[in-house]
Amino acid sequence: MFERFTQDARTIVIEAQEQARTLEAREITADHLLLSILAGGDNPAARVLHQFGIESDAVAQRASGLGVADAQALEAIGVDLDAVRKSVEASFGAGALDRPPRRRNRFPGRRSSGHIPFTASAKGALEHSLRQAIALNDKAITVEHILLGLIAEDSGLAARTIASLGVDPAQVRAAVLRERGKAA
């Protein structure tokens, strides 16, 4: 399937690994793909996301863990995150919930080239990008198809992230399709 990706789309997929590495993630998620689209410069998919006010910082915060809305939702059902942290640290020591330290690179100045696997949902989004290209009668998978694949299912991680930022994924889809129409 990867052979059907345009060079820009391949770059987005490769950049998702760098986004995951930067955020010290153990797996590449759909949010990392979304971040790589936003970081991908001047591409139609990034322009659409920016048009809706979707920026890298907000997506990175979601990809890194609990966002403000998540913390508020837990608080609404009686879960006090600070109390949970204090209780865990009292039992297991300070920093017990912190991420483990990253392994130091044996070659300073070079990034670790260790493989970071894709989650099933990220792989599914890339498969959806192929389906989007086929549905639109396109021979190659572009960055726009990747974004359409990410939001193909409302229950998908990227669609939920976009919705949590106050944007309806259906509106993003319509805007991507309009943007494609301009390019034709």
Image (tube, rainbow, N blue to C red):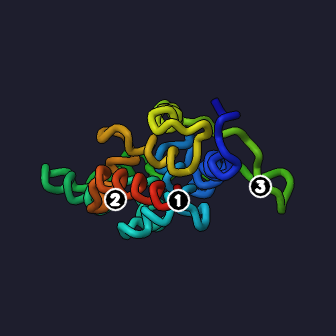
Instruction: Check residue 183 in the rendering and tell me which mark sits there, or answer none.
Output: 1
**Label 3 neighbour load within 10 Å: few <14, some 14-19, many 20+:** few
Which residue is rendered at x = 60% and y = 61% of the image?
40
**Label 2 neighbour load within 10 Å: few <14, some 14-19, many 20+:** some
167 vs 91, nearest the viewer: 167
Residue kind at label 1, given as amino acid type: Ala
Compute the Cα span from label 3 to label 2: 28 Å
Q: Confirm whether residue 141 shows in the render.
A: yes
151 versus 47 height, above or below: above
In this rendering, would 43 be left or right of 47? right
Compute the Cα span from label 2 to label 1: 36 Å
Asked whether disc 3 touches disc 2, contact meaning CB atoms under 8 Å apart, the reply is: no
Instruction: Check residue 111 in the rendering and tell me which mark sits there, or answer none.
Output: 3
Task: Point out the tag, 2 or 1, that comes first from the N-terminus.
Answer: 2
Q: Secondary structure at mark 2?
A: loop
Q: Position of residue 99 (x, y in %)?
A: 52, 50
Task: Point out the tag, 3 or 1, that comes first from the N-terminus.
Answer: 3
Q: Secondary structure at mark 3?
A: loop
Q: Confirm whether residue 125 shows in the render.
A: no
Farthest residue toward the right?
Answer: 107
